[in-house]
Amino acid sequence: MNEEIEDTLYRENIELADIKKRSIAFLVDEMLLSFILLIVLWDAFSQATTMEEIIIVTNNFVLEYMAMKIIYQTFFVMQYGATLGKILMKIQVIDLRTLSYPTFPVAFNRATFRIISEMVFYLGFLWGSFDPLRRTWHDRTARTLVVNV
């Protein structure tokens, strides 16, 4: 299977994005979403006076934050082939079957399994460091690759 994918990438002159670019894109997206969450919850955070209260506020909105991340990832990957972090790093997600932007079901699958990878101590992301095609768990389940633009 890997040889078939590698042949297709070579034939189409597509280059895989390196882990460093993907990591920076991840950090940009996480910082952006965290900043948005902070703005939305500013009243609750500003009323918290102790670290315990801040943790309680954060824990109360974990599901909403995960939903926000899934919506963000799904929309941008489906619409542009990349999140804002990926656009900044000049990389994008492609569907292995079509070599173009993922469709809604593919982008949603990828976004959902991305959250699962995060919940399991980011092991799905670590997996991408050792995969010859740099596929994380969410790339494998959605049958996508992250490539240079």
Image: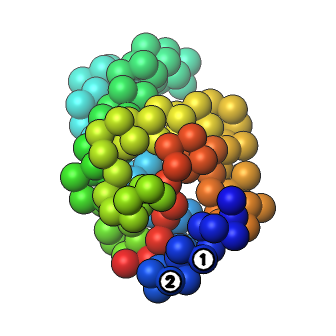
Where is residue 146? Give x, y as percent.
49, 64
- The secondary element bearing badge 2 is classed as helix
Residue at point 34%, 71% (across, down): 88
- Residue at image location 53% in from the left, 35% down from the top: 113
Image height of 88 relative to 96, above or below? below
User: Seen in the image, is 76 located left or right of residue 60?
Assistant: left
Q: For mark 2, what is the residue?
A: 11
The quarter holding residue 7 reads bottom right
Residue 95: quarter of image: bottom left
Residue situated furthest right in the rendering: 130
**Residue 107, how many percent across, how many down?**
37, 43
Judge by depth and name the residue closer to the eye, 40 or 141. 141
- Residue located 63% across and 67% down the image: 4
* Residue tagged 1: 7
Residue at 28%, 27% (x, y): give it. Answer: 41
CA distance separating discs 2 and 1: 6 Å
Identify whether 27 is placed above or below 13.
above
Amino acid type shown at disc 1: Asp
